[in-house]
């Protein structure tokens, strides 16, 4: 497939597009992230989610440290051509860096933001410090 499909996307002035990751079987929204052209092309090519980290200013493959990769089952473009929806299979059952299934674990109530989803795995056990990483 040629890369012409990337031209249909209305990228931000920074060359990014917002991306929603949705669990394929349940429809649950797991996370929101950003992609640049390279990340989206790699996602389509490799079949696993690749994002652009705005804080680190680099490509990151979801699960590269945690092992909780996102197998892509479908890539969809919205009607305005400015948002991507990934239908994924969340491997390991944890999408959030806090150790939860979804990044959307706080709900607004009359008392303010309330945590409504448990930590499934301690983040300290998921993410190793760079000096502890082994090849």
Image: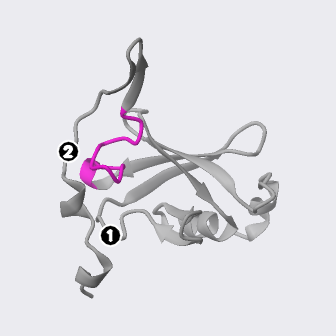
Residue 48 at x, y percent in the picture: 45, 63
Q: Is residue 37 left or right of residue 99?
A: right
Q: Are marks 2 and 1 in contact (CB under 8 Å)?
A: no
Residue 86 at x, y percent in the picture: 53, 48
| Above or below, 70 relative to 26 | below
**Residue found at the far bottom of this picture:** 135
Quadrant occupied by the N terminus: bottom right
For the residue carrying disc 2, how many other residues have a C-alpha within 10 Å: few (<14), some (14-19), or many (20+)? few
Label 2 residue SS: loop
- The picture quadrant where one finds residue 45 is bottom right
Residue occupied by mark 1: 65
Quote the CA–CA distance across marks 2 and 1.
Answer: 17 Å
Residue 115 is labelled as none
In the image, 129 versus 8, the foreground residue is 129
**Residue found at the far front of this picture:** 111
For the point 41% across and 57% down, the residue is 71
Label 1 residue SS: loop
For the point 42% across and 62% down, the residue is 62
Colour scheme of the rendered structure: one colour
N-terminal-most mark, 2 or 1: 1
Residue range in magenta is 92-105
Q: Is residue 101 left or right of residue 62?
A: left
Q: Is residue 10 left or right of residue 65?
A: right
Residue 129 at x, y percent in the picture: 28, 74
Residue occupied by mark 2: 120
């Amino acid at each position: 497939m040629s890369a012409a499909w990337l031209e249909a996307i209305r990228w931000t002035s920074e060359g990014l597009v917002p991306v929603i990751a949705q669990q394929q079987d349940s429809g649950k929204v797991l996370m929101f992230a950003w992609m640049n052209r390279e990340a989206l092309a790699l996602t389509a090519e490799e079949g696993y989610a690749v994002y652009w980290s705005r804080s680190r200013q680099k490509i990151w493959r979801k699960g590269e440290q945690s092992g909780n990769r996102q197998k892509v089952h479908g890539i969809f473009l919205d009607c305005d051509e400015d948002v991507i929806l990934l239908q994924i299979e969340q491997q390991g059952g944890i999408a959030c860096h806090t150790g939860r299934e979804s990044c959307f674990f706080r709900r607004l109530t009359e008392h303010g933001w309330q945590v409504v989803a448990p930590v499934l795995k301690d983040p300290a056990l998921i993410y190793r410090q760079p000096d502890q990483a082994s090849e």
